[in-house]
Image (spheres, coloured by chain):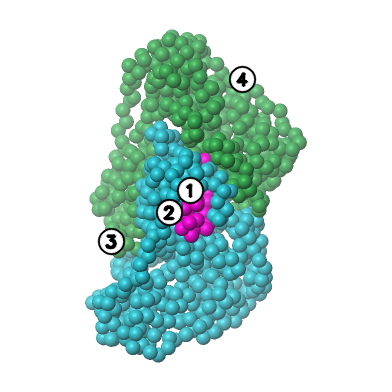
Chain colours: A green, B cyan
Amino acid sequence: MNGAEALMKSLVGLGVEVCFSNPGTSEMHFVAALDRVPEMRGVLALFEGVATGAADGYARIARKPAATLLHLGPGLGNGLANLHNARRAHSPIVNVVGEHATYHRRYDPPLASDIAATASAVSKSVMTVERPEELIPMVAATFAAAVAPPAGVATLIVPGDITWNQVPDGSAAEPSSQPPVLDAERIAAAAAALRAGGATLFIGGAATTRRGLEAASRIANAASARLLCETFPSVLERGAGIPAVDRLAYLGDFAVMQLAGSKSLVLAGADDPVAFFAYPGKPSRYAPEGCDVVTLATPADPADLYLEVLAEELGASSPPTLQALSLPGLPTGPLSGSAVAAAIGALLPEGCIVVDESVTTGISAPGLTQGSPGHRWLTLTGGAIGYGLPVATGAAIAEPGTKVIDIQADGSALYTIQALWTQARESLDVVTVLLNNQSYAILQMELNNVGAEAGGPRSRAMLDLVPPAMDFAAIARGFGVDAVRVATGEELVEQLKRALAEPGPHLIEALLPKGIS
Amino acid sequence: MNGAEALMKSLVGLGVEVCFSNPGTSEMHFVAALDRVPEMRGVLALFEGVATGAADGYARIARKPAATLLHLGPGLGNGLANLHNARRAHSPIVNVVGEHATYHRRYDPPLASDIAATASAVSKSVMTVERPEELIPMVAATFAAAVAPPAGVATLIVPGDITWNQVPDGSAAEPSSQPPVLDAERIAAAAAALRAGGATLFIGGAATTRRGLEAASRIANAASARLLCETFPSVLERGAGIPAVDRLAYLGDFAVMQLAGSKSLVLAGADDPVAFFAYPGKPSRYAPEGCDVVTLATPADPADLYLEVLAEELGASSPPTLQALSLPGLPTGPLSGSAVAAAIGALLPEGCIVVDESVTTGISAPGLTQGSPGHRWLTLTGGAIGYGLPVATGAAIAEPGTKVIDIQADGSALYTIQALWTQARESLDVVTVLLNNQSYAILQMELNNVGAEAGGPRSRAMLDLVPPAMDFAAIARGFGVDAVRVATGEELVEQLKRALAEPGPHLIEALLPKGIS
């Protein structure tokens, strides 16, 4: 068996079922192997950032890794931004990158570059196969690195001759998994902090599941503690029947207010909260001075289990506070960001997945969907824009039959717009609601936040997406996706109902007032 | 003066006039500085690969660096593939990457990553400004590294607080330039090899200008030597009135034939030729066994001057062989790759710039444009596809008033399709001839070349761009570019004439038979 087939077979043996691919010459044997390993589903992307973002979305929903297949250093480079987001989401990904044949690298052919250096910034582990007998052990080690808590991106670099030469028989061993052992000292310290009063319970990671949220809510009720969730959770379960939790604000002034007066901050699956960016004269850390930071569970730990044990420790016997069903009214008249959010809040189907890359225009989306039927909410964990369309693509592949709604800002959509084609090719149930406000509105806000003297026409032009005005519906149709433009609440509601009722991908371009709405 | 303004002013002082930008929060002070430094033209890209590719195209035509402005590690990652091409083209670029404020990095905020590691694979020089007084000297050093032969990408990482705090006055000193000193021993060795007979003169870099080509042609005539050009020159001057030169073939079997029987290979601005990829059982180096490799000039040297001195040394007094004007007939009937090439060959205006990312469908393009009026031909130096649209964008900005024709494969176009918007915004005279053959045809060929057993439906699907069929004209119009689809030679000729006569960008989508045509 050649190396390409052996790699695909070992991945299948480890439970990897999907390979998001944008291959080149050095990956042709992997492509050929797809015919001999039918258990591996190859999903073609037109751009590597789509493949890596889809692998992130897949991992968040399937809770296991997909593989990627990228072409040499430049292909990896194109996939880097969404690997960065996956790294911050703690999404396991087996990131396979083709390389020139071992004996060919020394000639420094045009496409040669330092792939390991490029991979290092986003990877927990980077390995390069040098000899055929290393392949299967390195597949196993890469898989193990990807899934070891906290999960993340593990990169395996495979030279062409390794793929076409025979490799020794064998199969990759699954990493041994131990039942989690909880740290009693951390539980005691967290309990003490909560009993002392004035605590804020700050959750993330594994704690943002229904199970974690129920325990967190019981604890907050018993200890009269504030309950907050990290700003950008990987997957937040929410909606009717699930405990509601406020997320820490993106804007520092609000985040500082949310934490003001906390005597202690109990971390459960989240890191000590810090500013997304530095701003002149503003703090980097958000916890108030003198606030005691107590780590119950790191992002690597089973934070949901820790919370359950802590709830018992605190004798938190009253039930969690569950969100009641409460739908916003359907919007009418000219569109705004909140009108779009209301339409989604009113119509989203139970069990659906929402991918939120709405940036400024989506500021009211969490509030107006809070009482909607239960759903999962995915966010931009790493801040590298262009995640929404690919993550929605991967999420839909992870869970066929579930509707995925991508609330998508215009500027961000343009980094990975090619994902629409993969959605069409794979007939995925993704509804993209594209918020066209003709600007990088977030940067108009940030220009002021960082204290830059704005106002001149040349700087403003750098934050404007007109002229020329883009027609996202035309672009989507060009990629094979059913697409319409809507300018009123009534049109949006009609088209959103249709898109949610029909199979396959749809894009609804909501025409908003220019700038922040 | 704050750091952002000081950096922009120093770049202007060094002759940098254009900054290709896709900024984020950490770069807002640079954006604000554009209003105070009107000599710097900010050009907005919707994706970083457009900005870096445009900087490559600009450098190839202007023969001086532009700056880029990228947002942290993920923004740099998105720009990496076209920086790789620029590195291989020896295009000078001052690659400015924003970073978190120096004091904020330790908190590892979501967008933090190892920017220097990411930059290292494509950069001659990577510097991070840590203190205000380092800024101007590092701007000077980065500029000097970018332009020092062989030119390339030099990266300057600038933390946010450096941009908004005051920096000491000063201006960046221009690097001192010495008149080139030619190495007499190399000239003597090359002359001896050519006098011995059976030599092949292999040119690249600075030798592919009219001046270098005229000297090379005189030498080849005087010494009865073969004359060949590297496979992927940065800029090749060609057409009527300029010596014609064959390029070394991309396909190894042909390349080996072109060099067969060479007793010596005299390198002038080119490297010893090697295979683009390794293939089982095929050689990595192309020069025949026993062929003596003699370096007259490396890619870092003024190869044109070396050739002129060598021509004198050889007493090559007869004039160079100039290409005669010879136009192909206009195509009629259904389109093919050669019909498209014939239309371009028949209609291309004197002095224009051709950006060739035609891949398989453009195989006849060099031949059918060889006798067209004089023009410059740009190629995919680094092999990272997605270079055509951005490089055409930058070339048009470097030379207003000159028509730029981008012969563009469909699969490759999709990596950086967002460049069309910048062409529309800046009203650039770029005519994109998009070759839609609905497939990664090059990979269909490469699948066989690497000896992979093709043929299965699952592997073939990975190389197909249908279903769904893409409508590139619709996508281009969505980005604000005038676009049409053509299916016959007559339609193509009519639309190409119109596009070349009108100002601003145009895209002509040529509907070709599926696969290799």
For the residue marked with disc 1, what is the amino acid? Ala
State the residue lying farthest toward the right.
Answer: A333
Q: Quadrant of residue A239?
A: top right
Disc ID at residue B172: 2
Q: Position of residue B42 (x, y in %)?
A: 56, 53
- Give me the C-alpha separation between circle 4 and circle 3: 65 Å
Question: Is A87 located above or below residue B121 in the figure?
Answer: above
State the residue lying farthest toward the bottom.
Answer: B318
Chain hosting mark 1: B
Disc ID at residue A324: 4
Nearest to the eye among marks 4 and 1: give it: 1
Residue of label 1:
B6
Nearest to the eye among marks 3 and 2: give it: 2
Q: Position of residue B259 (x, y in %)?
A: 33, 78
Is B265 left, or right, of B394 in this rendering? Answer: left
Residue B18 belongs to the span the image colors magenta:
yes
Neighbor class of circle 3 (other Cα within 10 Å; few <14, some 14-19, many 20+) is few
Residue of label 3:
A106
